[in-house]
Amino acid sequence: MKQLKATKQRQVIFEELRETACHPTADELYDRVRKRLPRISLATVYRNLELMAANGSIRKLEVGGKQSRFDGNASQHHHVRCVGCGRIDDVHCILPAEAEQAASGNDAFRVLTYHIEFFGLCRKCRKQRNNCE
Amino acid sequence: MKQLKATKQRQVIFEELRETACHPTADELYDRVRKRLPRISLATVYRNLELMAANGSIRKLEVGGKQSRFDGNASQHHHVRCVGCGRIDDVHCILPAEAEQAASGNDAFRVLTYHIEFFGLCRKCRKQRNNCE
DNA sequence: ATGAAAATGATACCTATTCCCAAAAAGAGG
DNA sequence: CCTCTTTTTGGGAATAGGTATCATTTTCAT
């Protein structure tokens, strides 16, 4: 985990991610960052997101969908995803010890962490489904 | 969920996925299937995996890594992934009602299902790390 | 101030997956 | 077991998210 130098680009990417309530993809974040640094390269955004995730200062969400999403909140929490529109919200909950026990199987794995992804329908998408189905 | 026709290709893909204890990627499965159907196309494998997942007869794992992985066991269960080598095992456990409650947030989401991904180190990778770190 | 290490922008590249379409196979109805 | 409609297939081209490359610029310990 080498020390990262404090560049303007890195700083702005981090700030924008922090201030975003949702969980943006790299190119959504690129659009936001470009408002402040119009000449930044998309590669720089990707690079820094990857580095900061490796660093532990942000999280790369390994959730479904083909684009990776990033989370400025590095502390452990979980997510609900709307299967209708892809919207992702945070969830705070913990797993009982038995569950972690089960995951370690007869010591086959040393469990380091876990992530729970809930799938559901948000209010807006529930309304739409009722109209057409 | 339209009815799928019973083609030889579909059948073999399903059988091979069923008989695989691990959670193969599309092209790993392609390699296996080609031993029985040497002229099958990779596109056919992708297509059918997608259709069968939509159908509910298999599961597409929304876990990390750039390639999708598939699971011949469609019943609800969870996964541990070794951060060292990528190996994935099954985990059977359930979440307390409070957790689902938390995920639904004030009825903002109707939770349909969930998936827990544990991250850890398998025995082999633990041994390797001890040697070199 | 200065030089090694790290970072950037621009673009080429890679690779997983999907699209396209003419030809082949499935299966319902007679 | 023909016949017609629908679905599926193979295989190559296309797409898209992400990564690598490299000359140039920036950072920052000394």
Image (cartoon, coloured by chain):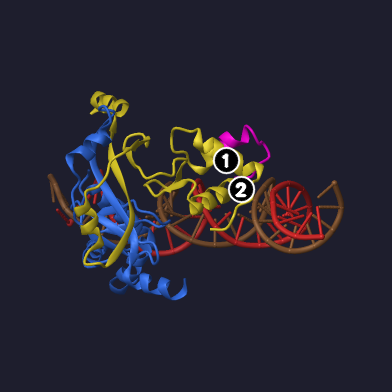
Chain colours: A blue, B yellow, C red, D brown
Give how far apart the Cα atoms at labels 2 and 1 are.
9 Å
Mark 2, Cα crowd under 10 Å, few <14 / some 14-19 / many 20+, is some
Q: Which residues are magenta?
A: B30-44
Considering depth in this image, is A118 or B95 the residue closer to the camera? Answer: B95
| Residue at which label 2 appears | B44
Marks 2 and 1 in Cβ contact (< 8 Å)? yes
Q: Chain of mark 2?
A: B
Residue at 57% of width from left, 58% of height from top?
Answer: B2
Task: Look at label 2 and name its amino acid.
Answer: Thr
Within the magenta stretch, is there residue A71?
Answer: no
The answer to whether residue B94 is seen in the rendering is yes
Q: Give the residue at the far bottom of this rendering.
A: A131
| Residue at which label 1 appears | B13
Which of the 4 image quarters holds residue B7?
top right
In the picture, the disc for residue B78 is: none
Relative to D27, say whether B37 is above or below.
above
Relative to C29, say whether B33 is above or below.
above
Foreground mark, 2 or 1? 1
Tell me which numbered mark, 2 or 1, is placed earlier along the sequence: 1
Considering depth in this image, is D9 or A3 the residue closer to the camera? Answer: D9
Q: Chain of mark 1?
A: B
Residue at 37% of width from left, 56% of height from top?
Answer: A68
Left or right of B101 in this view: A117: right
Q: Position of residue D14 (x, y in %)?
A: 60, 61
Q: Helix, strand or loop at disc 1? A: helix
The answer to whether residue A10 is seen in the rendering is no
Task: Look at label 1 and name its amino acid.
Answer: Ile
Left or right of B123 in this view: B21: right
